[in-house]
Amino acid sequence: MKEILVHGNTLPEAYHRAILALREEGELFSCKDWDQDQRELSMTFVAQTPLAEPMISKLYIGGARELQQYTMEILDGILDFKIGDGWAYTYHDRMFNHRGFDQIAFAINELRRSNDSRRAVAIIRDNDVDASNDDPACLQHLQYFIRNDALHCKVLMRSNDATKASFMNAFAFVMLQKRIADTLGLPVGSYTHRANSFHCYEKDFKLLEQYAKGIKTQDILALTYRYDDFYKELMEDAIPEINQQVAELRKNKGL
């Protein structure tokens, strides 16, 4: 498998370079589990200043509401109640309540203990569940470092759907990074997103082509939104509807 490393100042710059690299350098392999081919490589994309504007890529599936809900799932665990009812896990539960242990609180306390620690790690893989699960966790671990007086985050994915999931994953993990940085009273440093299998399924090859064409022919400003200007407001406007939907799901479960 090819190993690719790309950098960008902003999150969309790094993500777009990763998408373009997959289209131009990804190799074709079969994916028997999903009965189709895939374009694949190993990818690390680094956003040096992930909170810099423009922060939102237009090249992802969904819109402001979907991004807001996914971020709330990661940060606040709004769908943790579905574990055991069709879901074997959530990332939030694995991070904040892994066998009763809050790994994010541990990471914060570890960095408070020593600002040069290499031990602020949250492990997501649970072999007792994932080894026999048809949909094991793609996220494997997160690690946090304080270097040059900023909080840096490094994420490892065993598998990452490039066109359908990777931007939403990265955005939510950056928001978690910001929450931890705010708790520690630090600025947000770099964000590193490593996917051992960064791939696009055959059914989405046309979408990958569309994304790649846009990246090669359009200015970055035409492919992005500014988060603080208006996209954040759009996302926050969706919160009441999301909360209502979650409340109805909980009610239907008798919770």
Image (cartoon, rainbow, N blue to C red):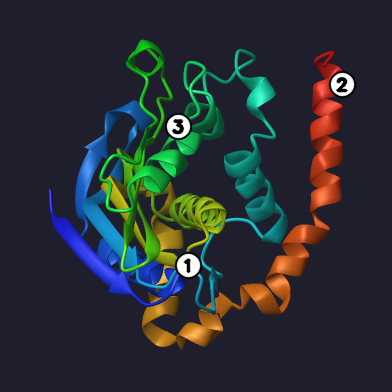
CA distance for labels 2 and 3: 29 Å
Corner quadrant of residue 64: bottom right
Left or right: residue 63 versus residue 102 is right
Numbered label attached to residue 103: 3
Left or right: residue 163 versus residue 22 is right
Picture layout, residue 19 above or below residue 76: below
- Give the residue type at disc 2: Lys
Picture layout, residue 43 above or below residue 133: below
Taking the spot 85% from the left edge, 31% from the top edge, the residue there is 247
Q: Is residue 154 visible?
A: yes
Numbered label tally: 3
Give the position of the C terminus as an image quadrant. Answer: top right
CA distance for labels 3 and 1: 21 Å
Q: Helix, strand, or loop for circle 1?
A: loop
Numbered label attached to residue 187: 1
Q: Helix, strand, or loop for circle 2?
A: helix
Residue 41 at x, y = what percent?
21, 52
Q: Which residue matches tag 2? A: 251
Question: Label 1: few (<14), some or many (≥20) within 10 Å?
Answer: some
